[in-house]
Image: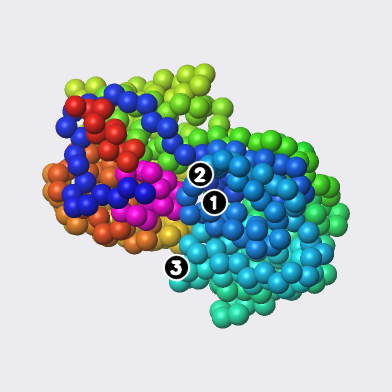
Amino acid sequence: MSVVPGSIPVVGAPLDCTVLVPGSKSIANRALVCAALAGGGSTVTNVPDGDDSVAMVRGLRALGVTIEAPEAGSFRFDSGFDPTSARYARIDAELAGTTSRFLTAICALRGTPSVIDGGEALRRRPMADLHDALAGLGAHVNPLATHGHLPVEISAGGIRGGEIEIPGGVSSQFSTALLLVAPYLRGGLRLVITGDRVSDSYLEMTVSVMRDFGVDASISDEDGRRVLAVPEGRYTPRWYEVEPDASSASYPLALAAVCGGAVTIPNLTSRSSQGDVGFAGLLAQMGCEVEWGDTSITVRRDLAQPLRGIDIDMVDMSDLVPTVAVVALFAAEPSRIRGVGFIRAKESDRLGDLARELAKCGASVVETTDGLMIQPGPLRGAHLATHHDHRLAMCFAVLAGRVADISIDDPGVVSKSWPGFWATREAMVASSR
């Protein structure tokens, strides 16, 4: 893994490059779970080598799933998950939120107790809605420290299907975890999401992956509530290729917006099941030219064309708030980001921590109840803290495209989703010369 020593290089001229981004970690972790539950016979390819995917494969192996890696990014399932296994499992998810939550639900299918734990930052992240929902379905959920947090011991108990409500205002990962195991619950599951909803696009992604593995999950709205229905059944083993990561693609596309020129992302199109593919359309609203090809996305910007400010609810594109905030610093008008108060509970406080770090560069970024107000103005170099958050590190790399003397405290944190990020950025800089 390449890391950046000292200041991050600025981009000296408009870009002209094609950037290969890793596979989607969100799709990959869903596909890996479905493949494990399907039993032996599946192969999942183009799995990214980031920490979250590594933690998922390691966790599934700890549960007794036999997974071989015939080549980089490809995982063959020679055996699947066995809920009757008496094998003791203690899973360390490190800092991977999806891994910890998805595997918690899988472990609720096992008769033998399992322990799910993680790093200190993951222990602080909320888990109560998922733990309470599993307990409501009859699983045994035993917190080993604080209720609603890791570490937790869990087993099947008398788990069953039926109908259950879960709040939608903290994380869609809780609902996804329940959906992924729902076919293996007696009678299936009818999941009703109550209250505010965040990241709905990730639930649609989950349903899409489940359908690809042969389970006909449905998603609908009833009286203003989101309802997901999953019949009892089994996933079907298959060969599955993970598409490129739309969240990762936001950083090279944002560099095109900020620095000018053209950046193309191959194998990612408007047909993607990832909500974050909409980032390109957002850049179009801000004044970039976007070409939606049959096999790629290209973002172009002539530096003579100023960027426009934007007022946007990002509830369904919340991982990209830091990226949008940085692009907005170079617009000709103020911007406002709304609807994302819940991202304070991500790897970092992605509102407060981001605003404070950008202020070190002279940026006027004001934290609101549910978002940010961004006022463009002169910027200067500074040393920025990443707060153990890969998305902050990569958005600061976009900022450094135009602002000299930006450095960060933990460039290696990008390993969570894109270990090769810095090498890719270096190649992008070279394309501008």
Residue 378 x/y as whole percent = 13, 44
Q: Name above or below for residue 3 compared with residue 95.
A: above
Image point (63%, 41%), residue name: 44
Residue 199 relative to residue 187: left or right:
left
The residue tagged 3 is 121
Label 1 near label 3: C-beta < 8 Å?
Answer: no
Q: Marks 2 and 3, Cα distance to the nearest angstrom? A: 22 Å
Provide the major secondary structure of the magenta segment. helix
Label 1 near label 2: C-beta < 8 Å?
Answer: yes
Q: Which mark is residue 53?
A: 1
Q: Mark 3: which amino acid? A: Ala
Q: Which mark is residue 407?
A: none
Q: Quadrant of residue 27?
A: top right
**Is residue 204 shown to the viewer in this render?**
no
Q: Marks 3 and 1, Cα distance to the nearest angstrom? A: 18 Å
The residue tagged 2 is 48
Compare residues 308 and 247 and report the one nearer the observer. 247
Q: Which residues are magenta?
A: 411-422
Badge 3 element:
helix
